[in-house]
Image (tube, rainbow, N blue to C red):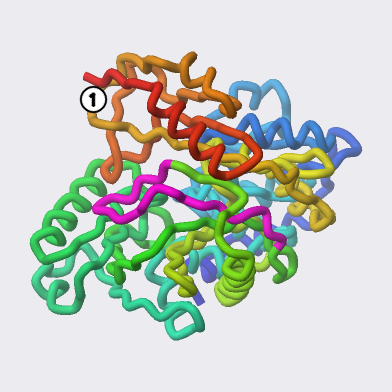
Amino acid sequence: MSPIMRLVQTHIRPVLNRSATAKKTKTGTSQRVLILLAKTTYRAKAFMEAGRKLGLEISVGSNHQQSLSEVVPGSSLLLDPDDIITSAKRIVEFHSRYELSGVVAAEDDFAILAAAAAESIGLVQHSLKGVSVVRNKGLMREKLAGKEGYTIWFQSCDLSEDINSILEKIRFPCVVKPTSLSGSRGVTRCNNSEEFMIAWTRLNKILESGGFGKGSDESLGEVVIEEYLEGREVAVEGIMDEGRLMLIGILDKPDPMEGPFFEETILITPSRLSALLQKKLTERTEQIAINLGLENGPIHAEFRVKAEEINLLEIAPRSIGGYCSRIFRFHPESTLEELILRHSLGREVDHYRSQGESEGVFMLPVPKEGKLHNVFGIEEARSVKGIKDVEITLPTGAQVLPLPDGNQYLGFLFAKGETPEFVESALREASASLSVEIQ
């Protein structure tokens, strides 16, 4: 049993038992969903709009105080994703006063907390055990080792270990991945021992600078070193429903992801892979999710595909991040956030279908370190045929730091068209229209 599971049984479930007979009050007749959002989230507006469209009462759980928390009872809850036990207790106690019908984590940081609270209350969610494993890259690889479609070599270690002893255990080329950081932060390809030592030093500095998770998974300082995989990178978006994958979409990443760093740029759906490969990807994603205990909730998986060979890179117990969910639209008219909320309430979602047109997003990377002074060419980018929107998300004057040291994107470009090729061309043309002044 994992440390988190033991803590939940010891500290959270007794609170639930004491609260079970408490009178639950509802401020209306609609169902209430608690959405867990990080202070730095891009997704608050999308989830709030989805909740309103579905006629739900929305409570926000976050790591910063909401402005209306004292004015509107039950509207928000202050939580710390790094203190799972205290925060899960708060959610259970909140449930005793404002009955919750669903708990949804919008970001990685809140995934374990959402699973712990939902499992304690008895709501639809991925299992706590599964989420705890997946949130630690080393544990995930150990769980999958030897399973079909997961044969890459890997080595789990700690930054406190002697680097020379680690070098004796690994092969090149390899990829260094910190388990306590999300996205591509700190992830580096190394082709030899010299590059490995540079990456190791860099990773120590990133962790010392702060901005990483210190949660009860005890993953601070843990690192996974794994085989570098050739091939193109794709992502699979879906919702697991009682162990069955409802495919939202397969996204191509047309830019080569060869390192040394792995900054994402363009995502396009539908995929241009063959129908057979897409079928294999869907089946592989579903089986991996089941093997890891992710059977009820959104998932986002990333793979390397080379010829007919498919290898998992990552799988996360949440939906696609940032503003990227905007590229998914469904019939009947719905957003991805609406489908996630529906599923959290136990409602049917498998009759929703993609609207069919090609869509894409360009995540604009931060080009260098410094202070952001201006972004030029925004209107020119907007005028490119096929471009739906241009969102510059970093404010003028912000201190910026590129990957792998930082974790920010300058903004997002969105495009729509009849074919993936048209969408990719529009995104590249719009991106070329922009120039960034950083000093």
Q: Quadrant of residue 363?
A: top left
How many numbered marks appear? 1
Q: Residue at the location (11% across, 66% down)? A: 193
Q: Residue at the location (64% across, 63% down)? A: 126
The percent coordinates of residue 118 (x first, y second) are 68, 57
The percent coordinates of residue 154 (x first, y second) are 31, 75
Relative to 75, 196 lies left or right: left
The percent coordinates of residue 361 (x first, y second) are 52, 38
Element assignment for label 1: strand
Q: Residue at the location (59% across, 48% down)? A: 269
What kind of residue is marked 1?
Gly
Task: Residue at the far bottom: name it.
Answer: 146
Query: What residue span does the magenta drawing correspond to?
Result: 246-265
Mark 1, residue position: 370
Is residue 293 visible in the rendered image? The answer is no
Q: Quadrant of the C terminus?
A: top left
Magenta segment: does it hold 263?
A: yes
Residue 146 or 430: which is nearer the viewer?
Answer: 430
Residue 278 or 126: which is nearer the viewer?
Answer: 278
Q: Quadrant of residue 76?
A: top right
The percent coordinates of residue 93 (x first, y second) are 68, 48
Q: Quadrant of residue 335?
A: top right
Vertical placement of residue 77 versus 257, above or below: above
Is residue 2 visible in the rendered image? The answer is yes
Residue 260 or 106: which is nearer the viewer?
Answer: 260
Relative to 256, 41 lies left or right: right
Task: Residue at the far right: name it.
Answer: 29
